[in-house]
Amino acid sequence: MRTTTGWGTRGPGTLRETPIHRRELRRDDIAVRVDFCGVCHTDLHSLRAHSGADLLVPGHEFTGVVSATGEDVTGFRVGDPVAVGNIVDSCGTCPMCLADQENFCREFPTLTYGGTDRHDGSTTLGGFSREYVVRDRFAHPLPPGLDPAAAAPLLCAGITVWEPLRALGVGPGTRVAVSGLGGLGHLAVKFAAAMGAEVAVVSRSADRAADAARLGAHDLVVSSDPAQLAAARDRFDVLIDTIPVAHDLGPYLGLVAMDGTLSQVGHLGPVTVEALDLLVGRKKLSSAGSGGRASTAAMLEFCATHGITADVEVLPSSEVNTALDRLSRNDVRYRFVLDLADLS
């Protein structure tokens, strides 16, 4: 077994520095020295839900450098910069995997943490650690020019909004709205603007107008203002809903144009929708989750071409609990990233 250090817990509450055991490299594995790992709302939810005695190490969007390779690895060399997201394996044979959508694997993909290893049945431990061992097919070369700290959130927040934008054909002439200007939302605005769409942000207050414009939005619709909602009725071809808590979808569906789509990617719990909100205008409600290997690679190349990374606040990993506490209060613009250099 390989031994490294990371931030974990055996129950809900505070993360503590702890030894972590990684598997010895299989023939198609690489070891990654983790340099930067983003802090996601999913990490917060996982920690709050964790009540067992098993070790939980969060973190599923990270960048680093290859530190070792398995015997059969040809696509990476020691020293190569890489990026890893929230999926580290899949069956590879089901229709979804064969369609390059490993994120929808019929046998369920192996998650970066809290997942079940397909070979030995062990529970995966995440990227809040100094080293990670991953199957080479699920690591991505980090394109030159992308800052590794600011690129880390692309592997979760980025790909989560990239998938629906691409699947819905966003491009020049498309009118796109983004509700929720957080970790996912600010990247959705950047992507949609770079794709050539006309972009608006939907926010509860006008405070975000300057930030929305800086990110590439052409307009801001204040959702707490009935007059503004009425003026924007049926306006958008695509609305990417990144709000991470349960909320009424009715007002947002009202902003979607005829035959348009609301894609909900923030809150993934139960939703209730009035059929009339869909019926009037033949509107569609969809969702998306993460992305396959081909889509993730395409997103990273797009980001390199257009100079897109996340807006991040980088903290030493020793401040991980501070980051989680502030994230719970939405006190970040727009993504915390941990610098793992302070771990041995």
Image (tube, grey):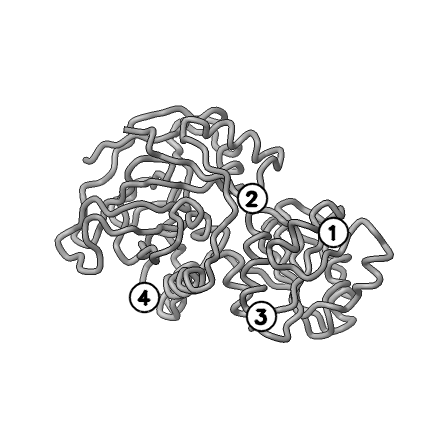
- 141 lies left or right of 52: left
Q: Position of residue 9 (x, y in %)?
A: 41, 27
Which of 326/208 is in front? 208
Front in this rendered view, residue 75 or 307: 307
Q: Which residue is mark 4?
A: 93
Q: Tell me residue 174's x, y (percent).
A: 63, 72
Q: CA distance from mark 3 to mark 4?
A: 36 Å
Nearer to me, 197 or 276 = 197
Mark 3 lies on a secondary structure that is: loop
Residue 87 makes an appearance in the image: yes
Amino acid carrying mark 3 in the image: Gly
The label shown at residue 248 is: 1
- Judged from the image, the secondary structure of the residue bearing numbered disc 4 is loop
Label 1, label 3: how far apart the Cα atoms are: 29 Å
- Residue position marked by numbered label 2 in the rendering: 334
Left or right for 38, reference 64: right
**Residue to which mark 3 is pinned:** 196
Q: Hey, what amino acid is under mark 4?
A: Thr
